[in-house]
Amino acid sequence: ACGNPDGIEASFWASLCGRIPKYGKHDPKNRFGNCLVEIEKPIETSEDWDLLGYIIGKKAPQYSTPVMKGQFVRPNIYKFKQFAASCAVVSNIDMVHIVGMTPEALTEEMAFGGKEPDSYLKVTEADFAWAVSQLSDPGEGSVNYVTLGCPHYSIYEIQQVAEYVKGKKVAPGVTFHVWTNYAMRALARLNGYEKIIQDAGGELMAAHCPYGIFEYPNVRDAIMPVNAGLVTDSVKIAADLPPMCNPGVRTYYGDTWRCIDAAVRGSWR
């Protein structure tokens, strides 16, 4: 349970050897927090958590272990998944404690191992506005590609998309992708969610993400020509995908429902 963010190879080696080197976060003394992060804005939605991960990843000291406290509505696993993905893609932070929530931070003293923090970070409403400005182009614009589900959507999140898009139609010229894994797509197919998304003009994609399909120039050019509009509900995509696109890409980041509305309308507002 007290693991490192190792790759899949390390897991295979450990399964063969029955052992793993005691280093990094396997060593209890390396798991204590050392940066106190005070959140001065209520954090509730998936978008809030997604942006919070970006802010901490960008502003907390690199290689630190932040300990967060503040005005949290207790996140479910889907919200925390967004937080972890966005923090990881913009930093080398591999562990974050939340006072009163995560197992090794039932109290602030417990999270820091009884020591004083090495550094402090305050996160305010202004930081969230700054994060959006870094991830999303200002103003309005036409849309070519709308992508949801990075990290991959759960069946619950697919259900929400299907219920919202039911009876709607994606605008002509817009590619609408919802990403998940094979197991979740099979479950979505059984429950009729995939057909609802397809009837609306979208596709439920499995086992990869736009990073993979945009490696092929012919696919990239067909979906995202020069000066195209990209819409996503993922900080990870908004931060990392544009460099893989054709020149002049306009990136728009927002919550899931705003992204779906853009796909149906054919423009971002």
Image: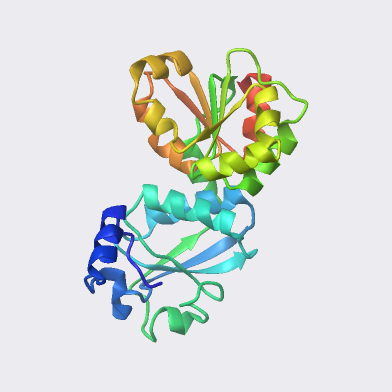
Identify the residue at image location x=37%, y=81%. Answer: 116
Q: Can you say which quadrant of the picture contains the C terminus? A: top right
Question: Observer-nearest residue: 134 or 66?
Answer: 66
Q: Is residue 225 above or below residue 188?
A: above
- Is 269 displayed left or right of 2 in the figure? right
The reply to whether residue 77 is visible in this rendering is yes
Quarter where residue 12 is shown = bottom left
Assign the N terminus to one quadrant of the image.
Answer: bottom left
Q: Residue furthest bottom?
A: 114
Left or right side of 254 for 91: left
In x, y percent, where is residue 72? 61, 65
On the image, the x and y values in percent for residue 246 come to: 37, 19
Give coordinates of residue 16: x percent, y percent.
Answer: 25, 64
Q: Residue at x 34, y 26 (%)?
A: 215
On the image, which quarter does residue 6 sit in? Answer: bottom left
Q: Residue at x 52, y 49 (%)?
A: 50
Q: On screen, 220 above or below 177?
A: above
In this orientation, does residue 269 appear?
no
Q: Position of residue 84 (x, y in %)?
A: 46, 55
Q: How is the image coloured?
A: rainbow
Q: Is residue 67 above or below residue 205?
A: below
**Res 26 quadrant in image:** bottom left
Circle count? 0
Q: Residue at x 61, y 61 (%)?
A: 75
In this picture, is 154 found above or below 222?
below
206 left or right of 220 in image? right
- Of residues 58 and 153, the one nearer the viewer is 153
